[in-house]
Image: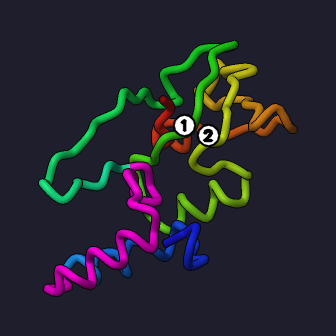
Amino acid sequence: MVDKLGYSWDKIHDIAEQLEHIRSEEMIDRLDKFLGYPKLDPHGDPIPDASLNIKSQKQTLLSKFKKGEKGKVVGVKDSSSQLLRYLDTAGIQLGSLIEVKDVIEFDGSMVIQIDKKGKITISRLAAQNISIG
């Protein structure tokens, strides 16, 4: 719904929860088809298939990375609107390529490069909520 309907990832959670209570199988099937049969929700969590099977993916929190390590953002641990807005402002979204340029010994904050563009510093708290795959 983020891609097809233009919702931001900090607003979609409440709407998705409302949609979970739809009782029309036909409506669910049509919406699923319209959305392109997504495998992940906007926060990177797997969506069960029609048989309620969930495909898991290997994830590591960004806070566990060391200088020089890199990977793709595949999810967020905290889906609060405050964190999601912060990530939007920082230019971090699902699929962003993150490379750790430095880890600040004092407080664990990190200097990261996003999608081979500019570098930013993020707090340890933010890094503890970004899942990399």
- Secondary structure found at label 1: helix
Mark sitting on residue 127 = 1
Q: Which residue corresponds to the image point at 72% horizontal and 52% vertical from the top-left?
A: 90
Report the magenta residues as a range: 21-44
Query: Does the magenta-highlighted stretch encompass residue 24?
Result: yes
Q: Secondary structure at mark 2?
A: loop
Query: Considering depth in this image, is 121 or 69 the residue closer to the camera?
Result: 69
Which residue occupies the foreground of this view, 116 or 25? 25
Residue 67, given in percent of the width and then of the height, sits at: 67, 14
**Count of all numbered marks drawn on residues in the image:** 2
Tell whether 54 sits left or right of 33. Answer: left
Residue type, numbered disc 2: Ser
Instruction: Name the residue beneath numbered marker 2.
Output: 123
Closer to us: 88 or 50: 50
- In the rendered image, which quarter is residue 80 located in? bottom left
Please determine whether, in this image, residue 41 is positioned above or below residue 1: above
**Residue 89 or residue 94, whichever sits in front:** 94
Asked if disc 1 and disc 2 are in contact, CB closer than 8 Å, the reply is yes
Please report the residue visible at 45 percent of the width from the left and 31 percent of the height from the top.
61
Q: Position of residue 118 (x, y in %)?
A: 87, 38
Residue 67's place in the image compared with 54, above or below, is above
**Residue at screen point 14% across, 85% down:** 23
Residue 40 belongs to magenta span: yes
Q: Which mark is residue 52?
A: none
Q: Quadrant of residue 66?
A: top right
Q: Residues within 10 Å of mark 2 (few under 14, many from 20)?
A: some
